[in-house]
Image: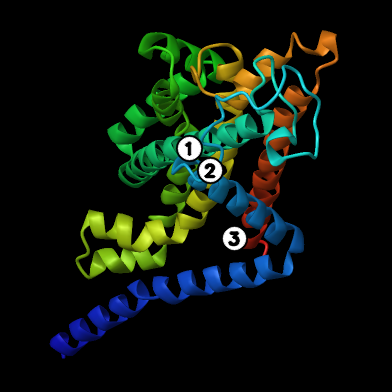
Amino acid sequence: MTSNTGATTIETLSEQAALIAPKGRSLWKDAYCRLKKDRLAIICFFIIIFYALVALLTKIGVFASSWEDAVGPAYQPPSFDSIQLLFGTDIFGRSVFYKVIHGTRIAMSVGLVSSVISIPIGVLLGSMSGYFGRWVDDIVVWFYTTLSSIPNIMLLIAITFVLGKGITSIYIALGATAWVGLARVIRGEFMKHKERDYVVAAEGIGASNVSRIFKHILPNVSHFIIINLSIQFMAAIKAEVILSFLGLGVQGQPSWGVMIDDAKLELARGVWWQLAGATVAMFFVVLAFNILGDSLRDALDPKIK
């Protein structure tokens, strides 16, 4: 009788622990259905895909490989005579359109690499802090509280000063500082989820801490990671533009920030097209990430359902 009762208890716990899978699938399926109905989010998604394709093709040399070559006289206004002159030329007769395309490559690469660095850090520290608590939580909270108390742009400037100018320094600076918000969110979610029935059931059937963290709890909070990715990507693009504008970012390449910095003295001469090209390109990608991030948050939030 005792044996049957024990077997029944284990089966019940196993069933409770297994409830996580259908809930996760239902959440993602419901989110997909919501996003399909949001036309503006779909448009923004394809805008981002377009920027990513342009960046990739530029990286492998399909587009604008000769951006350093002069294609016309200095400060030639925008013209439809050729695609090279679509946004006019700069002081050296180089194609502003080609420079905008290379700026797209730099912006997308900074967003991607910084996210690849920061998101695993934020997920790991946030999950450990929220799950284990006690002294682990104290250390992680102290660490990200200290970082967040420093103005972000000042911290980025300090790191780039230490590491030196260049795109590699931007990768490291953004990756090392952008994880704080995600870690705070993941910590709070883990603190809520670790006390729920399915985690207690998993513990009852002998699941290890690693299994409970990565197999049971993390899939339930993964939508926060997706949302943070869109926010982080956008923030990294803006930070790169600011640092390059200040002369601390990309060197010797046509970043949007460098183009804006070069164009600030050209406005007095009536040369507006380099500034317009860089700002319009940045505007559309940042707007697309903003709108898509809001749509993802609404679609993936189970409370709204």
Would residue 195 be visible to someone looking at this image? no
Label 2 – label 1 distance at C-alpha: 8 Å
Badge 2 crowding class, 10 Å Cα cut-off, few under 14, some 14 to 19, many 20 or more, is many
Secondary structure under tag 3 reads: helix
Q: Earlier in the sequence, mark 2 or mark 1?
A: 2
Number of the front mark, 3 or 2: 2
Asked if residue 173 is positioned above or below residue 188 in the image, the reply reads: above
The residue located at (59%, 60%) in the rendering is 300
Residue assigned mark 2: 55
Q: Amino acid at mark 2?
A: Ala
For residue 300, the mark is 3
Q: Earlier in the sequence, mark 3 or mark 2?
A: 2
Q: Amino acid at mark 1?
A: Ser
Residue 189 picture location, percent across and down: 47, 50
Asked if residue 163 is positioned above or below residue 126 in the image, the reply reads: above
The residue located at (19%, 66%) in the rendering is 206
Badge 1 crowding class, 10 Å Cα cut-off, few under 14, some 14 to 19, many 20 or more, is many
Asked if residue 234 is positioned above or below residue 169 in the image, the reply reads: below
Residue 297 picture location, percent across and down: 63, 54
